[in-house]
Image (cartoon, helix red, strand yellow):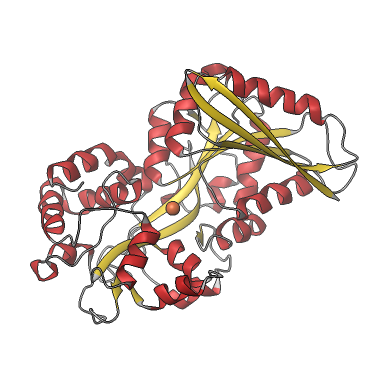
Amino acid sequence: MYTYCLIAISGCVERLQFEVRCFLAVDKESKGISSDMGMKRRALLATGTAIAAAAIHQVWSAEPGVAQANKVVNLYSARHYDADNKVYQAFFKKTGIKVNLVEAPADKLIERLKSEGANSPADVLITVDAGNLWRTQQAGLFQKVPTSSSLYSRIPANLRDPDGFWFGFTKRARVIIYNKTKVKPGEIARYEDLADPKWRGKILMRSSSNVYNQSLVGSLIAALGAAKTEAWAKGLVANFARPPEGNDVSQIKSLAAGMGSLSVVNTYYLGRLAKSSKAEDRQAVEKVGIIFPNQKDRGTHVNISGGGIAKHSPNRKAAQLYLEYLASPEAQKIFAGNNYEYPVVPGVAIDPVLVSFGKFKEDKLNPKVFGGWNRAAIQLMDRAGWK
Ligand code: FE
């Protein structure tokens, strides 16, 4: 039986308040919980980087006797999905290795890894978007996974770093969505068409500070070159229905409410709203249609959620085992399926909601390429007036 308890630690690090919440799924017969938590607290309190509302989750066995002393993997994750907890528990059941989770936005985790340096307790960093993986690699915060690892054979080459520093574990497509009362299917087919003056004042778009749009622009730079992409971005900005605001969910809801004709969002947000317990969410998503762009040429922009082994991982073997587990059919189904993402491993079944979106041709551009264009993309969006 699990017992859940909540420990709140408030502190002041570098004059910033932070809070650590520890959700412990404690097997009452497990021993040594205090020493492990002591380690985590020390590690956390030692760090110079304040992380607002960071959360540590420790997963303990529901089966007495499975837990083994010192078998642990310290995971820094920017994924904020409840489904991931199921993966941690399944991994523990399979291997006896506990997952200690530090959860925060990617930029905070990257800063934290930098400030912790060689003393970092982090074994694995998992984040969303290739732009963040690229930044982590550029900062020298990952280490190469040996080529003998099954990660190389299980994960297609276009969804992992060619040098083996990071691997994609889920995919998400960035699609064009339209308000069904304002646009007919077939009226728009490519990202490039978003700059067409016929959409003047009709496009809802998220801010250029969002990494999903930065990666999309990075993929356009790779396909069209910087000059054409900048001209495209200027045309797109001229078509905005309002200054950029809100997240992907907000774009879907605003579009459904008739505030614009077109927008661009990640597929899993559409899946989440379609499966939401709230009727208004389901009604919103019913009002929008999905277009997988660029089907007749390079394919739809696909991004990944992925990760790698931290440069100074104290539990390197466990870290590699954890990544390999994420690429197993069992974990792929949970990790991708519960968040309506696409698995990266071929042959793993996808959620019926994703099946309902239809099959599509993916842009096979390696995330390293559009991740590498991240800085240029930000500057270009800035010049184009994309707030
Ligand atoms: Fe997201």
Q: Is residue 94 left or right of residue 305?
A: right
Q: Is residue 358 visible?
A: no
Q: Quadrant of residue 376?
A: top left
Residue 193: x and y, percent?
17, 66
Left or right: where 255 falls relative to 317? left
Q: Residue at x 58, y 69 (%)?
A: 349
Residue 292 versus residue 17 in the image, above or below: below
Q: Position of residue 101 (x, y in %)?
A: 63, 38
Q: Residue at x 21, y 49 (%)?
A: 221
Image vertical order of residue 333 relative to residue 94, above or below:
below
Residue occupying the point 18% across, 67% down: 202
Q: Who is closer to the viewer here, 166 or 260? A: 260
Residue situated in front as seen by the camera: 43 or 292: 43
Q: Is residue 48 left or right of residue 62?
A: left
Q: Viewer-proximal residue, 1 or 119? A: 1
Residue 321 visible from this viewpoint: yes
> Residue at the spot x=61%, y=32% of the render?
20
Q: Residue 66, located in which quarter of the rendered image?
A: top right
x, y percent for residue 335: 59, 55
* Residue 15, image x, y percentages: 47, 19
Q: Nearer the viewer, residue 200 or 338?
A: 200
Give the total number of marks visible in the rendering. 0
